Image: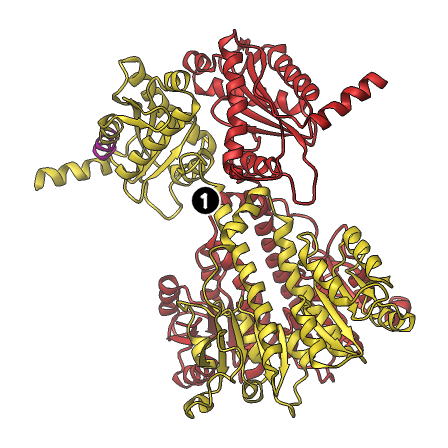
Chain colours: A red, B yellow
Amino acid sequence: MPAQILVVDNLLLSRMILRVKLSAACYTVRQATTGAEALHHVAEHLPALVLLDFNLPDATGLEICRQLRSDPKTCSIPIILFSADQSRSTRLQALAAGADDFLSKPLDDAYLMSRIRALLRTSAVEKDYQARCTPTLRHGLAEAQSQFHHAPRVTLVRSSAILAQSNAGTWPDIAPELFDDARSLSVVLSDSNPVQPPDVLLLGPEILDEQGLHVIAELRARHATCRIPIAVLLDKTTQTSPAMVLDLGAEEALRLPLDAEEVQLRLQAMIKRKRKADAMRQALGVELDLASRDPLTGLFNRRHAMSRLSDIVATPPDGTARNYAILLIDLDNFKRVNDCFGHGAGDEVLIEASARMRDAIGPHNLLARYGGEEFLLLLPDAEMVQACAMAEEIRRQIEGRAYHLTTGDFRLQVTASIGVTVQTSITSEAPLSRLERVRQVVDHADQALHTAKTTGRNRVSVGHCSINPARALVPRRATVGA
Amino acid sequence: MPAQILVVDNLLLSRMILRVKLSAACYTVRQATTGAEALHHVAEHLPALVLLDFNLPDATGLEICRQLRSDPKTCSIPIILFSADQSRSTRLQALAAGADDFLSKPLDDAYLMSRIRALLRTSAVEKDYQARCTPTLRHGLAEAQSQFHHAPRVTLVRSSAILAQSNAGTWPDIAPELFDDARSLSVVLSDSNPVQPPDVLLLGPEILDEQGLHVIAELRARHATCRIPIAVLLDKTTQTSPAMVLDLGAEEALRLPLDAEEVQLRLQAMIKRKRKADAMRQALGVELDLASRDPLTGLFNRRHAMSRLSDIVATPPDGTARNYAILLIDLDNFKRVNDCFGHGAGDEVLIEASARMRDAIGPHNLLARYGGEEFLLLLPDAEMVQACAMAEEIRRQIEGRAYHLTTGDFRLQVTASIGVTVQTSITSEAPLSRLERVRQVVDHADQALHTAKTTGRNRVSVGHCSINPARALVPRRATVGA
């Protein structure tokens, strides 16, 4: 079934005309004659978009619009309000009630259809996000949204000639609190990494005349501007079709002279949508980062560590073999902490021990929680000397200070056993697959860890090593020569 | 700095002309005169796009193109090859070498600029993905790509009138192995959830003439088609500008009559890009799902469980209070398994126990790995009777059969202790915040678990409960009445 559009109008003829137009464009049209019917249909079928008449038998379109906006399930459905009433106050009321657009009857077909396309395009981004939306992602969005409370930033884009005239490029005296600055198109296109990217680009009426319509496609193609919504100001006399402006990717085509209040409402709606999209992207990024993290300690998780290790065990086709070291670190007698003080105390110890290890390692080493109280440290390019020094440093840091538990105000002494292995990446993957090689390497470290455990704990033990002797010698010679 | 374009040409005049054009459109232009310089510059600066002349002093453009395509670091950079040589074989060689387009000199400015925009637009999607690309996501992409090996599917879109004539709508005798079917525009727009979505939509030359250019925007706006690349066939005599076709979102504008081999190369490149993008989306989805999973057992992780629990502890503003139950399940003496048989064996037991629990619970209940060997089961809408029955069933399943360990061919007996609490969602969040309430509820289950542990293990214990008495009575009455 194609995108479903709900037409709400109590006049049969009105509904029929819209039905014919929309069906011709291959939308599925559903109809409602009253506000109650409309609300019921939306709740049941969640249409892709609602075309809503201002005057309904049982309610005003405004009331229906407000009600749809107030329900989290329906608040994102695009709504176009329309009316035979062309008065300014009706238009402003419609926009203030949350309508995405207000159109006067008789409807301009080309504009209506392009407006529908533009709204569906924007809402597709949101739907895509919602389709991926897990509870944690939803919580993340709420967090991210709370971070986007900076002042609104609308950048007015004017030609260099106009900007050169004093004051001519400045804000057209509407919504001064939304205004950020006026910039030339070339400055906007040239600044690929603005410190404070605008929330909206408002193109002055001369821009399309001078540059051509393709300037919208240009802004959509550039990395720095592709996610900033565009509103275009159109001269009264321009030949440019507002429908084409929307089809090329702009969100609004505003005719001059501007109605200050209307423009303000439209820009505010654009800013709100933009910030919601930004928050979604940010929440998604946080979520992806978390996919490779252990939730308790914030360290990388085992899966991430195995992926990185799998990249390292094999020598790249054009590269030379590298030495690397694996440390398996296990907190000694950890079960006793859980058993005597509860899981909460155990978690506190894990968090504190993780923090100490993180402080001890360099930025190029990878520390992961490998299991319950077991950690894996991957040292790319490390030789035996560095690996052992690092292991001993970690052992000392873990043991160094007592662990202060907030639950019950206890102080605990904790130690760790560490197994070390130093390996060389191998060029030929035969006869072992990369996965088997990863397993083998971890197994070597595990055997060393076992030795550390069985010989008294709180110590470092070195296990089976396969070092590239040529490279391993280099630092020793350097030491001798120094 | 704006998007950087590298111009590779040994003719000064040629470079200057391109430099002026590109600078006017606010691109940063870098120049190279030889193939070696070009390769060096690309490796160093990774430009957004390369404009590459066919004839270079030290190499052909073809060789440079092939070399850039063969390196994973540079294989995704868009390349436009150009030459004064207009011969068919040159064009085909360029496309076969991996060039995204081949243009003959003198260059058509409007087309060149729109082609650059279209390529930057497409590569932005890939860059966005790469910016989020963790090692695990990269591995996931490799996996996802291996799943997209179905036959290529190009759908030819023709007008209903042409399709009605026998054979007229069929494939224009080129690349039959790419051909999937011919469909009318309305069928394509109406089928919002095709079983086998096409890899490419190839619009017949009459489509734009009959429908207007906005049909491209229409396909881009619809959920079912917005990610399918579009190629448009243009009549020799058409007034439609290929540049506008690209700016509206199509990827190719092909003039009739078609060169079968050229079209095949271009369509194949589109299919390849489409499938890479699909694989990226899929890998991202898998990654997001994994963010809420415990990697070892595949169960939900603690963070996800806490988010869901946080949704449930509070009664929604319009809802009535609900009962729900929490079970904390802990494997008994699990440390011994790890200590005696190693972590590998411990992991096997966790995986098997998780599978047994997953089989025992219904689809609406949420099972998460809460800690090392501790699991949390959330039963929304459960009363005391169901919660206890479920707990006892899980205890039986865990104990039921011996655990067969592949490492060493051991058989182990495992049991679990379970703490149960039944709670009612609360309307007022005062005086406890939602987070405090979650902690409190889990704490009640933890106390019950502690009782189960201290009174002999392998048993279910019920802890502090706050049940809505009115609702709790309903099922009992029903039982009495039956």
Q: Residue at x 61, y 35 (%)?
A: A426
Q: Does residue B160 show up magenta in the picture?
A: no
Residue A102 visible, this orientation: no
Observer-nearest of A69 and B106 = B106
The chain holding disc 1 is A
Question: Residue B427, image x and y in percent?
Answer: 38, 39
* Relative image position of residue A342 (x, y in whole percent): 43, 17
Q: For the residue carrying disc 1, how many other residues have a C-alpha within 10 Å: few (<14), some (14-19), or many (20+)?
A: some
The verdict on residue B389 being magenta is yes
In this orientation, which residue lies closer to the viewer: A319 or A161? Answer: A319
Q: Which residues are magenta?
A: B384-391
Count up the numbered dots.
Answer: 1
Name the foreground residue: A468 vs A40: A468
Q: Nearer the viewer, residue A203 or B246?
A: B246
Question: Residue B203: in sight, yes or no?
Answer: yes
Check disc 1 and report its element: helix, strand or loop. helix
Q: Which amino acid does the dot numbered 1 rest on? A: Pro
| Image-quadrant location for residue B266 | bottom right
State the predominant SS element of the stretch in magenta: helix
Image spot of residue B366 (x, y percent): 35, 39
Q: Is residue B225 left or right of residue A477?
A: left
Query: Which residue matches tag 1?
Result: A135
Point out residue B420 in the picture as x, y percentages from the top left corner: 29, 27
Depicted A234 relative to depicted A407: above or below: below
